[in-house]
Amino acid sequence: MSAADVWPIVKARLELLDDARKPLIETYIAEIEHRMKHYCNIRALPDNLLYVWASMTVDAVRVDLPNADEIADTVGGGANIKVGDTSVSGGSSGSGVTNTSKAVIDQVVLDYRVDLNRYRQMRWGG
């Protein structure tokens, strides 16, 4: 499983019609991959985490880019997204994100602990 497998799922879930945002969203895909591997202490993500990876990426993108037209349209009018202590109102009304991307992504990873803990491995001293 690779980032190339995640992109089509993220694109479909965000209802993106073209690949204009692909380079930016690929950075989120890569960041989430790194965070998942780090959290689980593994070198490769198992295939069973494909949809978790895609969901985490969608969550991070929606929270971090709430005012991007394509993204705002997938949230729904007047909807609120809350990840940890970051809250964003849907639509392009000018509301902002209160945390940096790094903090948002950290919180997204922690919100998926239930899915990730099954794959988490002990790290031995080294």
Image: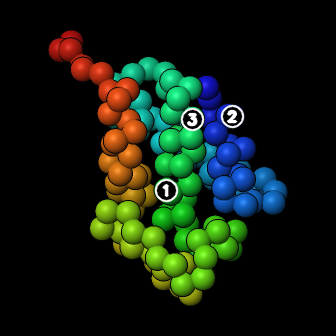
As helix, strand or loop, the secondary structure at mark 1 comes to: helix
Instruction: Say whether marks 2 and 3 touch (CB < 8 Å).
Output: no
Which mark is in front, 1 or 3? 3
As helix, strand or loop, the secondary structure at mark 2 comes to: helix
The correct choice, above or below, for 68 with respect to 28 in the image is below
Q: Earlier in the sequence, mark 1 or mark 3?
A: 3
- Give the left or right position of residue 125, taking residue 14 as reference: left
Which mark is in front, 2 or 3? 3
Q: How many marks?
A: 3
Is there any visible trace of residue 90 in the rendered image? yes
Q: Which residue type carries mark 1?
A: Ala
- Give the left or right position of residue 17, taking residue 46 as reference: right
Instruction: Say whether marks 1 and 3 touch (CB < 8 Å).
Output: no
Q: Earlier in the sequence, mark 2 or mark 3?
A: 2
Q: Earlier in the sequence, mark 2 or mark 1?
A: 2
Real-space Cα separation, disc 2 to disc 3, in angstroms: 11 Å
Per the image, the residue denoted by label 2 is: 4
- Camera-nearest residue between 21 and 116: 116
Position of the N terminus by quadrant: top right
Going 45% across and 70% down the picture, which residue do you hit?
A: 81
Going 46% across and 76% down the picture, which residue do you hit?
A: 80
Per the image, the residue denoted by label 3 is: 50
Is there any visible trace of residue 102 in the rendered image? no
Per the image, the residue denoted by label 1 is: 60
- Residue 84 lies in quadrant: bottom left
Real-space Cα separation, disc 1 to disc 3, in angstroms: 16 Å
Real-space Cα separation, disc 2 to disc 1, in angstroms: 18 Å
Counting from the top left corner in percent of width and height, residue 9 is at 67, 45
